Amino acid sequence: MVYTGVLRKMMTELGSPVQYYLQLENDIININQALNKTLEITFIKHECLHCHLDKPIYRQGFCKSCFFDIPQAADWIIRPELSTAHLDKEDRDLAYEKKVQLQPHIVYLANSSSVKVGVTRKAQVPTRWIDQGAHEAIEIVEVPNRYLAGITEIALKEYVSDKTNWRKMLKNEIEDADLISEKKKLAAFIPEEAKPYYLENSKETSIEFPVLQYPSSLKSL
């Protein structure tokens, strides 16, 4: 079989194990079914995910001109504490920024190489955790906008990392953590504006990945 399309981040579905789907132009392929099989991938051309032109990809799937222009690649995407839609202030496109920023966001703990703190839109749970390779995760607060999530993450990363050691993650060198206990320890450090949104009764989510064998050594490209 030959399939053609733009290579994007795979879709995922929480299950035992997680299911991965590669979405192409006219096909959706369950990648789990390709485990232990030989695949050949051939590069045809570039395609920016925004303008769809054949231009070199700069970052996040966008060409350089789109990356520095469109709201989907603005700084607040990576640094949610820079969000300003709740103040009715525009960065690149206020309508888009209100749509994305002014919706429920989750600040969470995840264990992908060690315990880390992170932010995602509520609609992206558990997708975000799967994308990060987390074996377990728990919600800390659910806030009404991205700014509150951002300042909460900033406060909590003084006490817990916000980074993943990708080598340990890929080699599965991960120890189970008591995320409920870790969440309770961090509760005291949540900013005052976000404390009313603390999730006292949130539970751990466990994630199983479809791995046949983890590598013993890694080499970056």
Image (cartoon, rainbow, N blue to C red):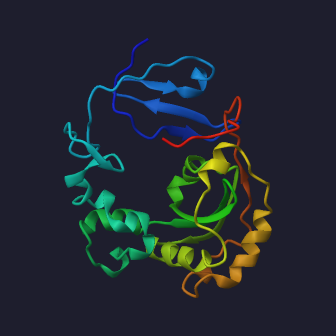
Residue 170, image x, y percentages: 64, 43
Where residue 4 appears, as percent x and y from the top left, is 34, 22
Q: In this view, does 1 lie above or below 131?
A: above
Give residue 152's quadrant in the image.
Answer: bottom right
Residue shown at the point (22%, 39%) measured from the top left: 52
Seen at 79% across and 60% down, the residue is 177
Q: What is the quadrant of the N terminus in the image?
A: top left
Q: Is residue 34 above or below residue 123?
A: above
Residue appearing at x 74%, y 68% in the figure: 201
Horizontal arrangement in the rendering, residue 38 relative to residue 94 (left or right): right
Answer with the quarter of the image where residue 85 lies. Answer: bottom left
Horizontally, residue 111 falls left or right of residue 27, namely: right
Judging depth in this view, the residue of 174 and 8 nearest the camera is 174
How many numbered dots are placed on residues in this image?
0
Classify 9 as above or below 94.
above
Q: Nearer the viewer, residue 35 or 179?
A: 35
Q: Position of residue 214 (x, y in %)?
A: 70, 36
